[in-house]
Amino acid sequence: MGRNTRKRRTPPAIKAIAAAAALALGGGGLVWANVHASAHEPDQRAWGGDRTKAATAQVATVSCPDVGQRLTNVPEPARQGVARELAALDRQITEAYARLASTRDAQAKDPGFVRNAIVGPLGEKRAATIVRIRIGVQRAGGSFDSTLEQLAPCTTRSANRTDAGGGQRNGGRQQDDGGQRGGIGGQAGNGPVAADFVDITKVAPNVQGKPRRTGNASTGTFTTRCGVNANKNHNTDNVIVAPGVANGAHHLHDYVGNQDVDAFSDNRTLLQAGTSCRNRDDLSSYYWPVLRVQDGTRDFDQNADGGGKEGNVGRILTPAQAEITYVGSPAAKVVAMPRFLRIITGDAKATTNGPANANAHWSCTGFEDKVQLTERYPICPQGSKVVRSFAFQSCWDGRNTDSANHRTHVAFADPASGVCPNGFKAIPQLTMRLVYAVPPPVIRNGQVRNAYAVDGFPEQLHKPATDHDDFIGVTRNGLADRIADCLNRGRNCA
């Protein structure tokens, strides 16, 4: 399966982001469009000028509690409907963010505009959606935590906040910084900014030692080679989080492994699909948000949902390497992964959720054993490449292949001992290492040029902490057992 070209309906509010992206990509060279300046301003091509600073933005983004993370008890018959309602919550936030980007002039004239025209109506829509979730859960015989209805109201996040999870109520005013220093910047107006980058040669070593192996450790490795998505198998769905919902991710994914994965895939179609893996028994789906360089170049999706229409702009970078390796446990023998196990690692909404589930690891070749970053993108020295790495949850509850919030059926081992929580079994730990040849960003006078960033929900501002990775385990002919046996015997297999 190649690029997903299915025609999809775009909410009207998203057109505001599309217009911003069009400005940013206009002409043949690099144009820096400030979508936060007033619409009547004659010159929007340069960040940080006097005219830009005069157009004070009330807020940078919308910050809403993540209802899905709190849903831990949804009966199986209700999960499809609940997933659709959770996708509706994401769509509502996306539309509200687009309205923020298109109404800066009105915000400057009316301090109450954001509260009355954007955040207030958004909270009302969310409240009605949460009620529908409650009804769906209760009709299926489940219990619903009534405190979740308190998650309907949203806050706003000011431009000069750079820490994950920060925000302020109801669009209060803050000092504008021209869209860069701590602001929301970026080629499409929603990041990244200069503060999101750091010269890795100036970062002190921060990599911690690994847990000491016990006598019962599983010390082997199993490598599966599935390519780098050179065939450009992309779509903006997420069948784990939003099954049956087109554009449920609101950003573009690279897919390797299983070649027939979109919002409408199920276990049956996954088993019938082809694979990009050399091992034809590995039909697993490995997918992650694409990485882009914002150099003014158009890519195929700049007028598409999940792409330029939602603030994901620039040239898509194909990894130079994509290494997929299963490793054992330092504290126990592992059991085989169950077929159709689904795991999400990291948090695509870490900007507003905070760092609790963030699991991003950014580094550079030659520095990986010394420096790993979560809240900054590295600027690598000459000859060094950018590295994204992921270490998935390695403990399984022994019963479920998924859970209502896609997290509670798996867990991380204790970082000091490597021991799984009570009631969980050690499974092969999926690790991924993606290497990119990235043109180094240039930071000058507090502004970034030639930035790169991971795709994400538009209101997440392309922060590095939002990086995440997804996995659906689909194997046949005993491959899952062979992987576990390889690790438990201490062998290095491929």
Image (cartoon, helix red, strand yellow):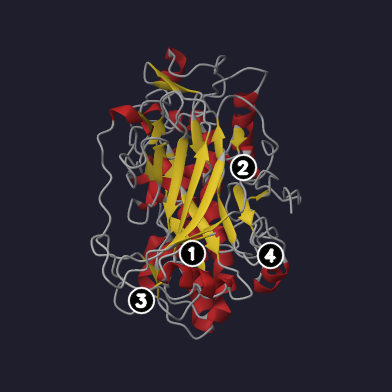
- For label 1, the residue is 343
Sequence-wise, which precedes: disc 2 or disc 1?
2
- The image's mark for residue 257 is none
Residue at mark 2 to residue at mark 1: CA–CA distance? 30 Å
Whether 278 is drawn above or below 136: the answer is above
Sequence-wise, which precedes: disc 4 or disc 3?
4
Callout 2, which amino acid?
Ile
Q: Which of marks 2 and 4 is in front?
A: 4
Report helix, strand or loop for mark 1: strand
Q: Residues within 10 Å of mark 4 (few under 14, many from 20)?
A: some
Callout 3, which amino acid?
Phe
- The image's mark for residue 424 is 3
Report helix, strand or loop for mark 2: helix
Sequence-wise, which precedes: disc 1 or disc 4?
4
- For label 2, the residue is 14
Callout 4, which amino acid?
Phe
Whether 235 is drawn above or below 23: the answer is below
